[in-house]
Amino acid sequence: MNGSEINSTYAYSLHGNCYLNVTNRCTLRCRFCPKFNGQWLVQSYGLKLYREPDVDALIDAVGDASTWKEVVFCGLGEPTLRLGTVLETARRLHESGVRVRLNTDGLSNHVYGHDVIPRLANVIDAVSVSLNAQTAAVYAVHCRPRDAGAYPAVLDFLYRASDCFAEVTATAIDGLVGVDMDTCAEIADKMGVSFRRRELDKVG
């Protein structure tokens, strides 16, 4: 299976990368997320899952891993809610020599109650963490976490991740009311990680 034949539900192609749609379940309820606005299409790819893919289905959807610049766990959900599937899929992809990246909200430690970063870092080369705000109050407005400990947990994840992954990037969406991009970038710098501005309403 080559890049033009990948399963558009479990995997989709953007910018020469293969993005894996692991789950639609989320830790957060972000106001800016397409699915919370009734939109399941990402650049013509339908990402609503009627069944969550297992490891074999994801590997099959990737196809020839050597055709991609990198394989990214992303989709319209939080990949680490399926931690075992992510770890095993990443292990198999990593062994094939492909670069593996995880896009995450940074709340996996908060969800599981212990530090899962070392396990992720064993099989994932880079991690992109959605910081999305410079304060817990602004974060609550846009990301709508279920408890007040979410934002500090994201900061803690970034701090811990900087010591484990080869590449860590904090991101925030430019255009959200009240989000100070310069302050977000300063937070990332203090954590010792890179920072990237994302565009509002642009996924991928």
Image (tube, rainbow, N blue to C red):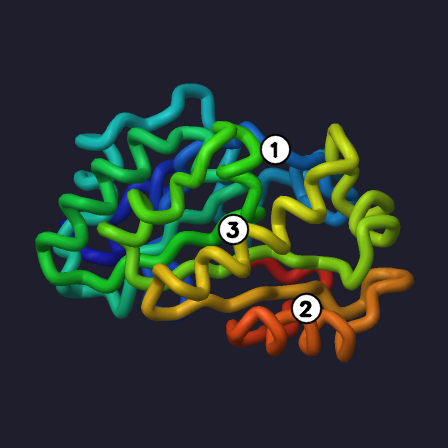
- Label pair 1/3, CB-CB below 8 angstroms: no
What amino acid is at disc 3? Ser
What amino acid is at disc 2? Glu
Q: Residue 170, how many percent across, how many down?
A: 57, 65
The residue labelled by disc 3 is 44
- Label pair 2/3, CB-CB below 8 angstroms: no
Q: Which of marks 1 and 3 is in front?
A: 1
Q: Which residue is drawn at 27% across and 69% down?
A: 69
Q: Which residue is drawn at 72% across and 63% down?
A: 200
First in sequence, mark 2 or 3: give its number: 3
State how far apart marks 1 and 3 are (Cα): 25 Å
First in sequence, mark 1 or 3: give its number: 1
Q: Residue at x 24, y 63 (%)?
A: 99
User: As displayed, is residue 171 above or below residue 45?
Assistant: below
State how far apart marks 1 and 2 are (Cα): 21 Å
User: As displayed, is residue 158 above or below residue 91?
Assistant: below
User: As displayed, is residue 81 above or below residue 7?
Assistant: above
User: Which quadrant of the view contains residue 55?
Assistant: top left
Task: Identify the element where label 2 is drawn.
Answer: strand
Task: Identify the element where label 3 is drawn.
Answer: loop
What amino acid is at disc 1? Thr
Give 37 or 149, whichever is nearer the viewer.
149
Per the rendering, the mark at residue 199 is: 2
Q: Residue 23, how many percent across, how many down?
A: 46, 31
Q: Residue 42, how many percent across, how many down?
A: 55, 50
Per the rendering, the mark at residue 27 is: 1
